Amino acid sequence: MSNRLPTLAIVGATGAVGSVMLDILSTRENVWGEIRLVASPRSAGKRLTVRGTEVEVQALAPEVFDGVDVAMFDVPDSVSAEWAPVAVERGAVAVDNSGAFRMEPDVPLVVPEVNRAQVRNRPRGIISNPNCTTLSMIVAMGALHARFGLEQLVVSSYQAASGSGQEGIDTLRDQTEKVAADRTLGERAGDVRAAAGDLGPFPAPLALNVVPWAGSLKDDGWSSEELKVRNESRKILGLPGLSVSATCVRVPVVTTHALAVHATFSQEVTADAARQLLGAAPGVTVQDDPAAGEFPTPADVVGTDPTWVGRIRQALDDPRSLDLFLCGDNLRKGAALNTAQIAEVVAEEHTTG
Amino acid sequence: MSNRLPTLAIVGATGAVGSVMLDILSTRENVWGEIRLVASPRSAGKRLTVRGTEVEVQALAPEVFDGVDVAMFDVPDSVSAEWAPVAVERGAVAVDNSGAFRMEPDVPLVVPEVNRAQVRNRPRGIISNPNCTTLSMIVAMGALHARFGLEQLVVSSYQAASGSGQEGIDTLRDQTEKVAADRTLGERAGDVRAAAGDLGPFPAPLALNVVPWAGSLKDDGWSSEELKVRNESRKILGLPGLSVSATCVRVPVVTTHALAVHATFSQEVTADAARQLLGAAPGVTVQDDPAAGEFPTPADVVGTDPTWVGRIRQALDDPRSLDLFLCGDNLRKGAALNTAQIAEVVAEEHTTG
């Protein structure tokens, strides 16, 4: 227990998620004392605004973690793998948004609305933040599971360019400018590809297109992103036998992932019961009145905190199944916000004992 | 039996599907004798090129069907409902691409690769062409069903703007121009909506967005498009008890629908077995080598005839289920091409007796 507010380090402060993190922290005045910004040596010396004050970015080094209570990491897997243990060694709790530790049995994978208690179960001093695609549905799925018992998920994603970072955003904007200039495109095979130019981080043009690929190739034709949805959902919900099939598809949206989900439960569930339960669930907003044109879309959801749920239907051929459409800002709840929430749970321990 | 080539009438010749139909017919020189073009009085008098020759569009009237052997309709449901029976009365076989007759028990719903024999089963002289979304997967699903016995489909669509006709295409192009001009858009709720301008036929902006809605509202929150996928798949495959859940989503693509499908069969099916079977199926092209960046995308498929299938995976938690990603040009196989194929089956009867 301590009277001072805890010290926070943000590693990867200059990335797409990092800049959203700074916005989020500026709305949370009484949680953190000092906030240190850390990035690669290339970005060291930059000055960023946190809570209205300019802070200089420091280069990643063991000393930056001295006196730090919580260190958030939003960096590539290999950087987290090397540096999260260094932060722990220097006395910090590491909250990591990479894939480096998520499936380690002695590292909890936490979504506070679903499994907050797991934060304390951290023998290595590391807590993982889930992948953004899993996070775009798991708060709602966790609430439904608690009541109806989840047995199967079939997930199709509509993933935003910013899931591939600032390079993804820039590529989509460049391509959109190029294809907008020619009103004949998209009616003959390959003409969009020829006009779009640089593919950036994507394996096919994203403007005026959808691309059924995200991540790297794993066994049997699955992408790493699809396996993350399966493995992380199982771990967060504590359902090692949950049946999950995901197809991950990139769409020409800047930020906010959407998911079409077919969920099967152990008992019958009506659309009304699901709507009522989700309407009362923390972190979830139901927007579901198609007669009035009301359903979530990425362009209307971006920049907001909740998981938005609409198009809630009971499957016509199975009263135990629901079909839903969900949207969540992949940089906020999908990354920075959930990381901040985990860090705040740790901070509470620190301040309250 | 007749020595002359049959006469064809195209009703709705000036629409988005009609213009693709004229292209397709220009590659089929020896099927049809006279080709008459028919449209609303507003378009009458226009001259369009068919098989290299200019033809004047006639206004829809009973007399235009005199001497016609096959009349294709690509017009709104209400126009088909009124005029297809008129064409039949005047001696033609009507091949209709509207939703007016598809679920009538005495009107066959035909995809030649799947249920060609149904063409002859037409007591009312009318044959229906399926909805474009169903057509984007049903050739491949029919081939898999014939071998493995289909039991369940979970479908998420990525539907192109041209599914809403020329107005849909124009709206997407207008919106794309507008949002391309501002590189800050898509990071704050509602800014894309404010910039995109006219929504056209869509209930939300389509540029830099995805919209989980297509068609009209039916019972229990389902859209008409989603029910078409269910009802038409059941009818074409002859499986009245097939379990189908579809979520239909519009994406900012000009033409070519894509679908993520989770299909469950009565017996085990490996990805290799599915790949081999689909590779040999008429009307299907397999493009499935993610290690080489090979999977179908709408921008690369548009303007081609086959149903393209990629990302073929056996479900990790159920050896009887496959996950796939399919693309099909919604104006070609999804509309004009399948209609032309049905009409050609009728023409063969006519010429061969």
Image: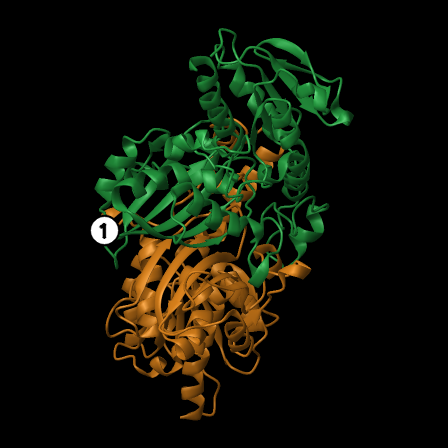
Chain colours: A orange, B green
> Does the image show residue A209?
yes
Mark 1 crowd level (few <14, some 14–19, many ≥20, 10 Å Cα): few
Judged from this view, the residue extending furthest toward the top is B3
Name the residue nearer the viewer: A7 or A249. Answer: A249
Name the residue nearer the viewer: B10 or A80. Answer: B10
> Does the image show residue A69?
no
Reply above or below: A345 against B215: below
**Quarter of the image where the C terminus of chain A is located:** bottom left
| Position of residue B282 measured from the top left corner of the image (x, y, whole percent) | 34, 28
| Position of residue B192 measured from the top left corner of the image (x, y, whole percent) | 65, 51
Judged from the image, the secondary structure of the residue bearing numbered disc 1 is: loop
Q: In this view, does A178 lie to the left or right of B40?
A: left
Name the residue nearer the viewer: B326 or B269. Answer: B269
| Position of residue B335 measured from the top left corner of the image (x, y, whole percent) | 53, 32
Judged from this view, the residue extending furthest toward the right is B42
Reply above or below: B294 against A75: above
| Position of residue B56 measured from the top left corner of the image (x, y, whole percent) | 70, 14
- Amino acid at pointer 1: Gln
Figure quadrant of residue A352: bottom left
Q: Which residue lies at the image location 52% right of the left edge and 40% below the top edge?
A: B131
Which chain does the numbered disc 1 sit on?
B
Figure quadrant of residue A88: bottom left
**Quarter of the image where the N terminus of chain A is located:** bottom left
Figure quadrant of residue A228: bottom left
Q: Which residue lies at the image location 57% right of the left edge and 40% below the top edge?
A: B101
User: What residue is pinned by disc 1?
Assistant: B267
Q: In this view, does B12 lie to the left or right of B316?
A: right
